[in-house]
Amino acid sequence: MNVLVTGATGLIGNAIVQRLVKQGASVRALVRDLARASKLLPSSVRLIQGDVTSPGTLPAAMEDVELVFHAAGMPEQWHRDDSIFDRVNRQGSVNVLSAAHAARVRRVVYTSTMDVFAAPRGGELTEANIDPHPKPTVYERSKQDAERAVEAIRQQGLDVVFVNPSAVYGASPVHVGLNSFFIQLLNKKAPLLPPGGMSVVHVDGCTDVHLAAAERGVNGERYLVSDQYVSNADLALAIHQAAGAAGKPPPVAPVFLIEAMARVSAPLARVFPFTPLVAPGQLSFMRWEARVNAAKAQRELAFRPTPLSDGVARTVAFLREQGLVPRA
């Protein structure tokens, strides 16, 4: 079976590729930079140069493909150019799924996000409650728009299964999102912790769900995937304990202080070459504190949550192997 993976040099896409190769699948990856991708992917993977934002590069990638994992996207909650979220997350998805439909691909597994669902602050997310209202951040709105666009193409006859992860962490060739929290904390570059917390999932379990969705997911269904909810304070403590770090994690910043920092730093970061310590979108997500109910993925796709202590320990070990955090 020929399988195409987009986003193969990212956290989720790379894990999917590695697993497929181990299972003996014939894997090809759509990549922008052939030299970089060749260093990050197994040698058996066929690299096809292209971009989800360049529809002309997609038909060749889809030739004789039976299954597509569309994991490419902009996962960050902040970027200097806000328009990139729509170009990659919505239009990129339209381009990929339109090409898959034209090529008569049997199934697409689409990597979405927990952010498209509705819940009050601290409430529970389930697949039954898609948020009809625009979300507060550009990233989240782009993912909402992408889901609607993907569903429209599915209605035209393409088989699509949606996977909606919570915040993903673990071994990865890129270090954004939750992995960057590990790196900042263990390199003592986080003097204060943001308030709030998030639902999290280790990349191995997230990969399990993607592969199970390809095999036995139901066309048009969404599958939320999360190990558990964890506060930023408890996550920092788990990271410290796994790393054997001396002392205590930094304290949690007062909400008013971190909100002021986010408001001031984001506009400055659009002018000067730095990334905000906490972007407004990140703060909004962490203060949402939504709890993901992953019972459907457990029931239908045999998802098994990774204990936080295990996932954190494996991530710390990986980051040490990569030389990104200090050794004990």
Image (spheres, rainbow, N blue to C red):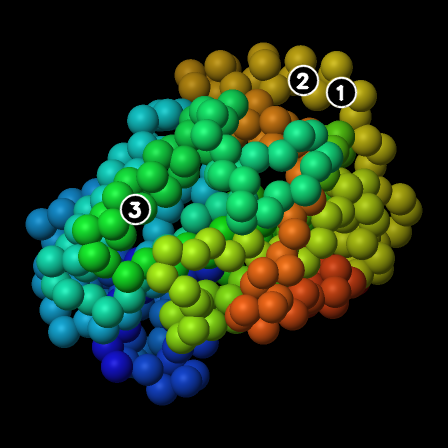
Gap between marks 3 and 1 measured at Cα: 37 Å
Q: Mark 1: few, some, or many residues within 10 Å (few <14, many ≥20)?
A: some
In the image, taking residue 130 as reference, residue 86 lies left or right, namely: left
Q: Are marks 1 and 2 in contact (CB under 8 Å)?
A: yes
- State which mark lies toward you, 3 or 1: 3
Per the rendering, the mark at residue 150 is: 3
* Residue that appears at 41% across and 85% down: 23
What residue is disc 2 on? 259
In the image, taking residue 114 as reference, residue 49 lies left or right, namely: left
Gap between marks 1 and 2 measured at Cα: 6 Å
On screen, residue 171 above or below 72: below
* Residue that appears at 41% across and 36% down: 144
In the image, taking residue 168 as reference, residue 272 lies left or right, namely: left
Which amino acid lies under the numbered mark 2 shown in the image of this protein? Glu
Which amino acid lies under the numbered mark 3 shown in the image of this protein? Val
* Residue that appears at 80% across and 21% down: 254
To which quarter of the image does residue 40 belong? bottom left
Gap between marks 3 and 2 measured at Cα: 34 Å
To which quarter of the image does residue 265 belong? top right
Per the rendering, the mark at residue 134 is: none
Judged from the image, the secondary structure of the residue bearing numbered disc 3 is: helix
Q: Give the quarter of the figure containing the C terminus.
A: bottom right
Judged from the image, the secondary structure of the residue bearing numbered disc 1 is: helix
Per the rendering, the mark at residue 255 is: 1
At which x and y percent is residue 264? 58, 13
At which x and y percent is residue 95? 20, 47
Q: Give the quarter of the figure containing the N terminus.
A: bottom left
